[in-house]
Image: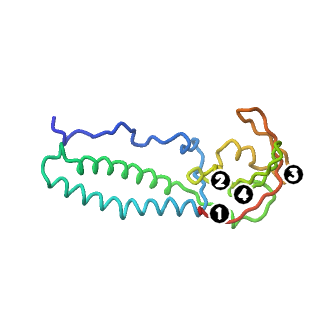
Amino acid sequence: MSKAFTRENDGAEEDELEPALQLPLGLKNYITPAGYQSLKDEFDQLWKAERPALVKTITWAASNGDRSENGDYIYGKKRLREIDRRIRFLSKRLDNAEVVDPAEREECGQVFFGATVTVYGQDGVEHTYSIVGVDEADAGRGRISWVSPLARALLKAREGDVITLQTPGGKEELEVTEIRYVALSLN
């Protein structure tokens, strides 16, 4: 059979996501305005700049003749599949996103999506976490996904509440000391 009529597959399933990026079934894809803009910027960069340039390179490489030993063509097709997969992923995420701006939320004294929460742990150390969307979580910067165990434990807590978090090392108690709703940036 001619290769023109077979589907090239680099071993990756088309819509398979890392487990950390999968949303539990039936839950909305909440995201902050900064997170949404970041996804949109990446989508625009791939769709309007990288993909057209790559298609031009692939067209040039294909015009050079034998494609079976043409590195530019082979690499270009593989990279194009990766870009197209990422574009489909971003498109779905953007279409299903529900943007929630924490800066517009009135101070309510309770933890919800977008809250920046300061907690005091049993170890005597104070930590600050912002509860954000799955696509913008960055634990190193104190940004935790709203579906993470820590965020789930914090949701609906009030200042002064002590929450219990089940960790691999056992149960840990955290006291909520401050709840703020402020605009978050990705910088």
Which residue sits furthest right?
160
Colour basis: rainbow
Q: Amino acid at mark 3?
A: Gly
Q: Secondary structure at mark 4?
A: loop
Q: Quadrant of residue 56?
A: bottom left
Sequence-wise, which precedes: disc 2 or disc 3? 2
Name the image quarter holding the N terminus. top left
| Circle 4 Cα neighbour tier, 10 Å, few/some/many (<14 / 14–19 / ≥20) | many
What's under tag 1, amino acid-wise? Leu
Tell me the distance, in whole angstroms, between the alpha carbons under discs 4 and 3.
15 Å
- Check disc 4 and report the residue beneath it: 115
Q: Which dot, 2 or 3, sits closer to the camera?
A: 2
Q: Disc 2 versus disc 4: distance between alpha carbons?
A: 10 Å
Query: Does dot 2 land on a helix, a strand or a loop?
Result: strand
* Mark 1 residue crowding within 10 angstroms, few (<14) / some (14–19) / many (20+): some
Residue marked by disc 2: 143
Q: Earlier in the sequence, mark 2 or mark 4?
A: 4
The span from disc 2 to disc 3 (Cα, nearest Å) is 21 Å
Q: Secondary structure at mark 3?
A: loop
As drawn, is 22 to the left or to the right of 48?
Answer: right
Where residue 168 sits, quadrant-wise, is: top right
Q: Nearer the viewer, mark 1 or mark 4?
A: 1
Amino acid carrying label 2: it is: Arg
Kindly indicate whether the residue at mark 3 contacts the one at mark 2 (C-beta within 8 angstroms). Answer: no
Q: Are marks 1 and 2 in contact (CB under 8 Å)?
A: yes
How packed mark 2 is, by other alpha carbons closer than 10 Å (few <14, some 14-19, many 20 or more), is many
Tags 1 and 4 in contact by the CB under 8 Å rule?
A: no
Rate crowding at label 3 as few (under 14), some (14 to 19) or many (20 or more) other CA atoms within 10 Å: few
Q: Which mark is residue 184?
A: 1
